[in-house]
Image: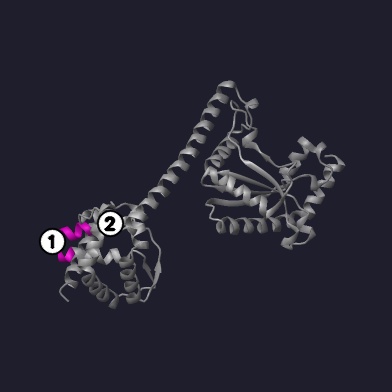
């Protein structure tokens, strides 16, 4: 190792703790601001380059560096977004949050030739803004931020594990195969965006139909059921009353498991649930009071309204104990426990 490279390694050892501290600061800033700006992300992660990795870098490209400050990726931050269009939103945020070294930053996606091998991400070289108040020691340290979609990250991880970082390191046949996979992932990224946008559009359409009172036209699925539980005033008031009776704190839980249960009861539309609420509200409240008299809860599901409405429906519509047990088995997946719950429900009806 040359004296110059040894001096860089010695400087790295002195400064490593500062880079570790900087990594935590930058990660916290990114997580906070991504959430504040409604940018969905899978992960924000960082690493400080290990000494052996730095030694290898210096051995390969040592002539480029005169001091540790010339090496811009001692600290590497990575934002992994669920969707590729959120990569650009995250990029705009990074540009506002930090000072960018534009000369050394690169959008590797734009540099990739149409027929080239790879599926790449966006790289920024950054420093903390002085107005953040972290002081010169931290402000002087450069760090890299990579921004990728989940599929871009998958590609990078697998291709790195395979050991192929460019088309020059593999036979032409393998290059073609890798390029085909990269193309499929790009198509998948675009399709996921389309599906997300279609779901959002559908959700907006459902919200409008519910606001107009067209509940009988809205078929039950996870989107419509969530919208109904969150926005329908009758259901919200009913759920609030049950939570008050229980004395527990509400916990948000997906109502997906109730779709099969509602189907068992013959409920096909949101209008069917609303009718069930009108017809069975008092019966459901009575069941809830009897249940909470003997049960102490600290948390209660946000779907508690559906829970008691379904049970009131079972009791008021002539279902046999065998039918009730089959209904219970949808959620318990245990026939003996389901039968026991069915018997308890029927007995409660006679108290």
Q: Is residue 281 above or below residue 158?
A: below
Task: Return the residue nearer the eye: 274 or 148.
Answer: 274
Q: Which mark is residue 132?
A: none
Q: Which residues are the magenta region?
A: 314-327
Instruction: Please indicate whether residue 156 sits to the left or right of residue 256 in the image.
Output: right
Q: Give percent across and percent down for residue 74.
A: 72, 48
Q: Is residue 207 above or below residue 344?
A: above
Residue at 17% from the left image edge and 66% from the top image edge: 315
**Residue 108 falls in image quadrant:** top right
Q: Is residue 126 above or below residue 119?
A: below
Q: Which mark is residue 215?
A: 2
Secondary structure found at label 2: helix
Q: Residues within 10 Å of mark 1 (few under 14, many from 20)?
A: few
Q: Nearer the viewer, mark 2 or mark 1?
A: 2
Task: Return the residue nearer the eye: 143 or 241.
Answer: 241
Q: Which mark is residue 320?
A: 1
Instruction: Please indicate whether residue 120 sits to the left or right of residue 280 in the image.
Output: right
For the view shown, which residue lies furthest in the right direction? Answer: 3
- 2 or 1: tag closer to the N-terminus: 2
Q: Give percent across and percent down for residue 155.
A: 55, 37
């Amino acid at each position: 190792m040359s004296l110059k490279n040894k001096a860089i390694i010695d400087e790295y050892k002195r400064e490593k703790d500062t880079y570790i501290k900087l990594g935590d600061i930058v990660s916290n800033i990114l997580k906070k601001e991504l959430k504040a700006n409604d940018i969905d992300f899978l992960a924000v992660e960082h690493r400080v380059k290990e000494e052996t990795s730095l030694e290898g870098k210096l051995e390969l490209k040592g002539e480029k560096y005169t001091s540790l400050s010339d090496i811009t990726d001692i600290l590497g931050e990575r934002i992994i977004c669920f969707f590729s269009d959120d990569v650009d939103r995250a990029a705009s945020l990074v540009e506002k949050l930090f000072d960018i070294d534009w000369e050394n930053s690169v959008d590797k996606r734009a540099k990739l030739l149409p027929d080239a091998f790879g599926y790449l991400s966006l790289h920024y070289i950054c420093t903390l803004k002085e107005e953040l108040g972290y002081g010169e020691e931290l402000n002087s340290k450069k760090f890299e931020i990579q921004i990728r979609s989940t599929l871009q990250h998958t590609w990078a991880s697998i291709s790195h594990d395979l050991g192929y970082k460019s088309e020059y390191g593999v036979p032409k046949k393998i290059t073609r195969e890798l390029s085909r996979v990269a193309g499929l992932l790009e198509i998948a990224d675009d399709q996921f965006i389309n599906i997300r946008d279609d779901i959002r559009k559908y959700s907006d359409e459902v919200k409008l139909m519910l606001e107009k009172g067209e509940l009988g036209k809205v078929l039950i699925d996870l989107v419509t059921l969530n919208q109904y539980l969150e926005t329908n005033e009758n259901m919200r008031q009913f759920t609030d009353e049950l939570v008050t009776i229980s004395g527990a704190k509400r916990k948000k839980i997906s109502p997906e498991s109730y779709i099969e249960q509602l189907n068992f009861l013959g409920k096909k539309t949101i209008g069917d649930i609303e009718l069930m609420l009108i017809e069975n509200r008092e019966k459901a409240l009575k069941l809830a009071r009897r249940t909470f008299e003997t049960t102490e809860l600290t948390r209660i599901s946000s779907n508690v309204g559906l829970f008691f409405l379904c049970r009131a429906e079972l009791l008021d519509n002539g279902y046999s104990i065998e039918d009730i047990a089959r209904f219970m088995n949808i959620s318990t997946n245990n026939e003996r426990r389901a039968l026991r719950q069915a018997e308890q429900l029927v007995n409660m009806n006679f108290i």
